[in-house]
Amino acid sequence: MNPVVEVESLEVKFGDTWALSGIDLTCDRGHIHALLGPNGAGKTTLFKAILGALDHEGVIRTDPQPLRMGHLIEYPAFYARLTVLENMRLHADYLGVSHDQIPALLALVGLEPHMGLRCSQTSLGMRQRLGVARSLIGDPQLLLLDEPTNGLDPMGIRACRELLKRVRDECNVSIVVSSHNLTEVAALADRLTFLKAGRVIHSVCRNEESQQDLEDLYVCLMRKDN
Ligand code: ATP
């Protein structure tokens, strides 16, 4: 089966700075693909380029074309005075899709009991979960999630991990996720790609690495002159 996304020789420049250079990446259909790398490595920029939100050189091929993509990039923004439910409805209206699936999506992320709460009254973790629920509106074929467990407590992190696996397995959605949490990534991803200073420096199937090996590998890769 064709990959859901193939990136070839991708370059993104901000002014005189190359944020991404020579990126080659293949995201397999139905898999969770994790991007790892230090602050400023280019993970968010890569998400934005795949979304078509940035000028770039190189090729980004999707299958199908166009691909329905949901995303959670950086901290998700919501209308503070609107409720959880109203924010979801507004996004569905923006996408031109019905409201029918919203209660199920809120239930999926455990927010159904809080759907009447104004967003100004929600916690950081609740907003992260709302961001994931919002990214699922419109039946995306690919989810791009930039540090979705930011601000979640340990129970929330585990719930998010289980949620993403369910989304992959039950909704047949491919997922690209970035994280700084190696434990979380080791338990979640099918493939790990390491970025450093705008380049891919390593890519590996998760099963090839135990969690301790993964930490050692990360430290070794980031210390090395690549
Ligand atoms: P973090 O882990 O901190 O979220 P990241 O891996 O997501 O980092 P990016 O946000 O993609 O990194 O940034 C990659 C590089 O591009 C950095 O050097 C950053 O300063 C630069 N950059 C990102 N956005 C812009 C912009 N709009 N204008 C100029 N430079 C930018």
Image (cartoon, rainbow, N blue to C red):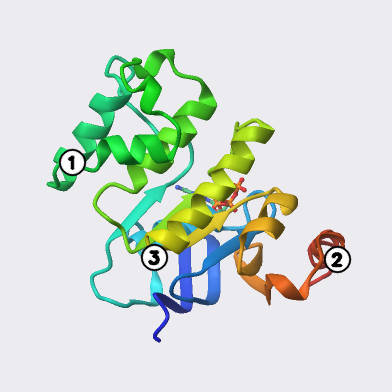
Looking at numbered disc 3 in the image, what kind of residue is underneath it? Asn
What numbered label is drawn on residue 213?
Answer: 2
Task: Residue lying at the far bottom in this picture: please name it.
Answer: 1
Q: Secondary structure at mark 3?
A: loop
Q: CA distance from mark 1 to mark 3?
A: 19 Å
Give the quarter of the image for residue 120. Answer: top left
Residue 108 point in image, percent of width and height: 41, 41
Quadrant occupied by the N terminus? bottom left
197 lies above or below 145: below
Q: Nearer the viewer, residue 45 or 137?
A: 137
Query: 148 left or right of 141?
Result: right
The residue at 83%/67% (across/down) is 217
Looking at numbered disc 2 in the image, what kind of residue is underneath it? Asp
What numbered label is drawn on residue 172?
Answer: 3
Mark 1 or mark 3: which comes first in sequence? 1
Q: Secondary structure at mark 2?
A: helix
